Amino acid sequence: MTHTFYDLFGIGYPDSQSTTYKFDQDLSDRLYKKYFGNRKGIKVNTMWDFSSAHPFDRLADAGLTSKPKTKQVIDLLGLYPDIECIMFFEFFDRMNSDAWRKTLEFCIERLGIENVKIIGNVENNEFRNEWFPYWFLACNTFFYEYTEEDIRPSSFEHTYICYNRKPNKHRRKLQQSFIKENLFKHGIFTMGNVVSQNEKHEIEVSGINIVHKTYPDNCYGHNANMSQEDKEYNIPADAFSLGNLSVWKKSFLCIVTETLSDESDAVYPLLTEKTYKPIIGMRPFIIVGESCIPAKLRELGFYTFEAEIPSDPVEAVKFLQNENLDLLYKKLYPRLVDNKRRMNRFTSDKKRFYNCLDL
């Protein structure tokens, strides 16, 4: 048995034409070879815990592909006794440690912890997990390359820009705060439709509704084929561009509503393309998300802007109304240049470490 790619996308991103499909395959191959070489083993994508697995013949014959993925892995080790090692990886979202704990413990007991690797968007180092921000590496490969002139401010007509697609709870809460404080008029604040049953249930429970707002000139950007849900949300899943450049050039502060909220108690944050954009687009930013994000960004060598701009979005927008944004941008410009350089160094160093500079 050679090392096998086990269930690349599950039900999450089944489209082989999706922008990162081949990149994810190749990256996970490099990670496996980095730690296990050519040893016999498998790679398991932990995304979507209860999707059916890739159809191994013996699994299908045994009727195991209808089981939760966490149990399929255990059965897989029983059906293939020649498996020597296993790599669990999570790229797109946060790995659900609680759902996978029994499976990880079983594999560690069976194979030894030195033969089990857990890598990617993990929340802690409970099983010697290795965290790295997948989205920063993907953006380094796929993000549109802008010139200095492309992103240079033309004016600061918009005090802030806050792009949102999925109406998650922390985004709805922020939107309601902006409505209450009459801050919509000072910037761009988008919000997608309510689509999933989970979103509808959250709204019913919390009582925090949304105002659907899509910016009519916001284009699909580049390499944005990341989701089939665009038409439902009515906002594109534009992971790899800054969107409409005329809007970006007129905006000062980027308010990033990250994927997860401050209710998370993770040690390691989930950093996505949402945080990458203002760094590569050279704008000051504040993060609405996990409380560990600012400290982690500083640990990685990035500058955060609490010294100049309040970290609370409502207070930040109010504060900036009394500031000369042209002068403040000039003051922050060296920090913005350093952040962009740091991002390029960081992603290149990570790719070099994982032997994937060519990806």
Image (cartoon, rainbow, N blue to C red):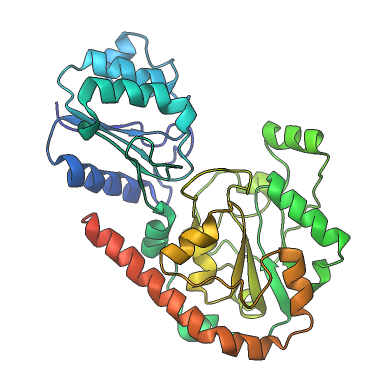
Residue 301's quadrant in the figure? bottom left
Residue 256's quadrant in the figure? bottom right
Quick check: 52 above or below 321?
A: above
> Residue shown at 46%/42% (left/top)?
123
> Residue shown at 37%/9% (left/top)?
63
> Residue shown at 65%/61% (left/top)?
163
The total of numbered circles placed on residues is 0
Residue 235 location, x and y as percent? 65, 54
Q: Is residue 43 visible?
A: yes
Quarter of the C terminus within the rendering: bottom left
> Residue shown at 23%/58% (left/top)?
353
Quick check: 314 above or below 24?
A: below
In this view, the residue in front, 175 or 233, is: 175
Quarter of the N terminus within the rendering: top left
Q: Residue furthest left?
A: 38
Q: Residue furthest top?
A: 62
Residue 154 location, x and y as percent? 63, 87
In this view, the residue in front, 214 or 338, is: 338
Residue 34 location, x and y as percent? 19, 47
In this view, the residue in front, 3 or 103, is: 103
Q: Is residue 239 visible?
A: no
| 313 left or right of 13 in image | right
Residue 258 location, x and y as percent? 59, 54
| 242 left or right of 129 in image | right
| 340 left or right of 312 in image | left
